Amino acid sequence: MMEAVISHRRVSVVGCNSSGKDWTAGRIVLWWMSVHYPAKVVVTGPTHRQVDDIVWNEVRAAYYNARISLGGHMYQTPRFQGRKIDTLEPDPQHFAIGFSTSDEYNLQGFHSPNLLVVITEAHGLPQRDIDALHRLNPKCTLMTGNAFSTSGEFYDSHHGKRDLYKTITISADDTPNIVEGREVVKGMVTLQDISDRKEEWGEDSPMYRGSILAEFPDDLEDVIIPLSFIRESMNREVVPEGEITIACDVARFGRDKTVVALCQGNHAEIIWKVQGKDLMSIAGWLGRYCEDNKVDNVVVDDTGLGGGVTDRLREVGLNGTNVIAFKGGETAQASDRFSNKIAEAWWVMREWVIAGGRVPNDDALIGQMSSRGYTIQSDRKIALENKMKMSKSPDEADALAMAIYSGYAKAGFGVW
């Protein structure tokens, strides 16, 4: 990365998680300011957290730990102010700044003969923002990101526009801890991390391929919710509004988890995961949460063991909370389109994601949602891939699908 920005006008780096992309980008910012004058650096990305808390923290750390004084002034906000060479006064034409924005017009005006643009999490930045940055005619553009998109400038820079970029790919297998077979650099990806991801997602999952191998996954037609949809959803800012619905997927096997998901309008989250709890303990937890948080609806996967939880909740009674039994094998409301209710629920979850819902940042959930396949049967009905074919039971995704589905069912399936 450091060598590439010296001699290339556009550099695009796709890497696994914890491969040092942001660490390196932070030091490139200071290097650029040290060897160019006058110079400007713009650091941007989809979220303020990624820009300030991650990349700019690396800029600050490099500045304060430098072996020689780098001059200038480092602010608490994402800004470094350079000095004039002759008077050492602040130079308004020599600075580095970091920010995120929802308005591409805020990216205008940063002109300099030595302009560096750094785009972090480039796979999640809207094309309009990247186009606005290109219009600044920077001397160098550095994009870093993960292989979590199948369209847009970052994806194209490693595919159809590859001739316009110096491309770099960093797989976990390229990083020091994996090469050495031991932890030699703290904070970088480890063999244990890879083992955990294999166990959690499976090696064929788009999440594993993108997060560990730095391979761009294909959004196959038989995946019900493409990873690119999910990543776009995660970057949204939503306000919880409307009825609160929680849904519980009750564990059936030793390795499976009991998972509770919450949905309120376009807001969703995983609120509880547990293994080894008996049915009465699960029912007790659900009852207490409903009372403490004024939950409108509690949905329970009523097939198999879950029926005991449903019965107990109805027996004790929940003040102001509807208890809804969900049986995935039952006939779908849109019975002409779906083979059963669970297929319908997953498709409703897909529509919710596309229409504005925000998927919570839960790795297990994302891996399950992005790898569940479906088929169109001979009767033209949509059927889900059998969960027995998946490397892990989709506990989190099933719970979220039930929570979202309940709201759509009440609304009369206007989405159709």
Image (tube, rainbow, N blue to C red):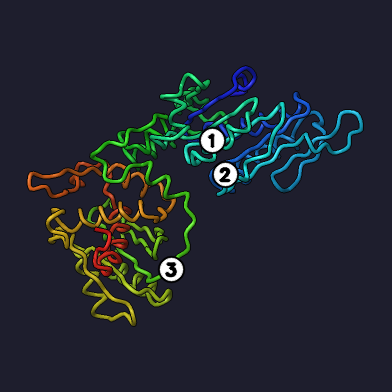
Query: Which of the two labelled residues, at mark 1 and mark 3, occupies the earlier sequence position?
Result: 1
Left or right of residue 147, residue 332 in this image: left
Left or right of residue 190, residue 272 in this image: left
Q: Mark 3 — residue?
A: 241
Report, in whole angstroms, how far the alpha carbon at label 1 lies from the one at label 3.
34 Å
Report, in whole angstroms, how far the alpha carbon at label 2 lies from the one at label 3.
28 Å
Q: Mark 1 — residue?
A: 131
Q: Mark 2 — residue?
A: 104
Res 246 label: none
Viewer-proximal residue among 382 and 156:
156
Viewer-proximal residue among 238 and 290:
238
Contact between marks 2 and 1 (CB within 8 A): the answer is: yes
Q: Residue at x 47, y 27 (%)?
A: 157
Where 101 sits versus 274, above or below? above
Badge count? 3
Tell me where residue 94 appears, x and y as whole percent.
Answer: 77, 34
Q: What is the quadrant of residue 113 in the picture?
A: top right
Q: Residue at x 26, y 57 (%)?
A: 251
Question: What amino acid type should be assigned to the residue bearing mark 1?
Answer: Asp
Question: What amino acid type should be assigned to the residue bearing mark 2?
Answer: Glu
